[in-house]
Image: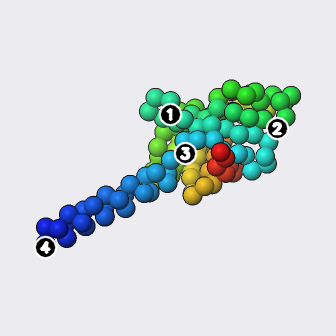
Amino acid sequence: MAIRLTTAAAAGLLLAFAIPASAQDVSGTWLRDSGASKVRFSKCGDAMCGTISWLKEANGPAKVGQRIFYDMKPAGAGKWNGSAFNPEDGKTYSGTMSLAGDTLTTAGCVFGGMICRSVKWSRSN
């Protein structure tokens, strides 16, 4: 009986750890809070990258297929650090991402993270 209880407890712990891991998956398509664009995140080597997959206005500086998040590597639970490209000014910034449920917050920072501009995204299918 003790062996069954131990096996059941171990299985429960494995399930408990498996659920948060999938909840922290940033892969997929995300809609910007302004509704102006969608970005698809996928693996690129040992990191995550984000590419514009849809634009409300196609006449601006951003282009569908343009990679705007580079080398986003895990930096803790639901957090990534890498680079973020801003098509509006043509500059690349130090980038961060944090995931909380179905809300992704991305930020581009300068001066070692002292000044950041963030954007919120929601999952889009």
Q: Are marks 1 and 2 in contact (CB under 8 Å)?
A: no
Q: Measure how far apart labels 1 and 2 are at the Cα level.
A: 25 Å
Residue 3 visible here: yes
Mark toward the start of the polypeptide (1 vs 2): 1
Choose mark 4 or mark 1, whichever is in front.
Answer: 4
Residue 1's tag is: 4
Q: Residues within 10 Å of mark 3 (few under 14, many from 20)?
A: many
Q: Is residue 104 left or right of residue 90?
A: left
Tag 3: residue type?
Val
Q: Residues within 10 Å of mark 4 (few under 14, many from 20)?
A: few
Q: Are marks 4 and 3 in contact (CB under 8 Å)?
A: no
Considering the image in quadrants, where does the C terminus appear?
Answer: top right
Q: Is residue 5 left or right of residue 18?
A: left
**Residue at 13% across / 73% down in the picture?**
1
For label 1, the SS is strand
Judging by the rendered image, the residue that carries numbered circle 2 is 56
Mark toward the start of the polypeptide (4 vs 1): 4
Tag 4: residue type?
Met
Residue 106 in the image, given as x and y percentages of width and height? 64, 46
Tag 1: residue type?
Lys
Q: Is residue 119 left or right of residue 36?
A: left
Q: Nearer the viewer, residue 2 or 55?
A: 2
Judging by the rendered image, the residue that carries numbered circle 1 is 43
Q: Measure how far apart labels 4 and 3 are at the Cα level.
A: 41 Å
Pick out the residue farthest to the bottom.
1
Judging by the rendered image, the residue that carries numbered circle 3 is 26
Tag 2: residue type?
Lys
Q: Measure how far apart labels 2 and 3 are at the Cα level.
A: 22 Å
**Residue at 42% across / 57% down in the picture?**
19
**Residue at 54% across / 35% down in the picture?**
42
Mark toward the start of the polypeptide (4 vs 3): 4
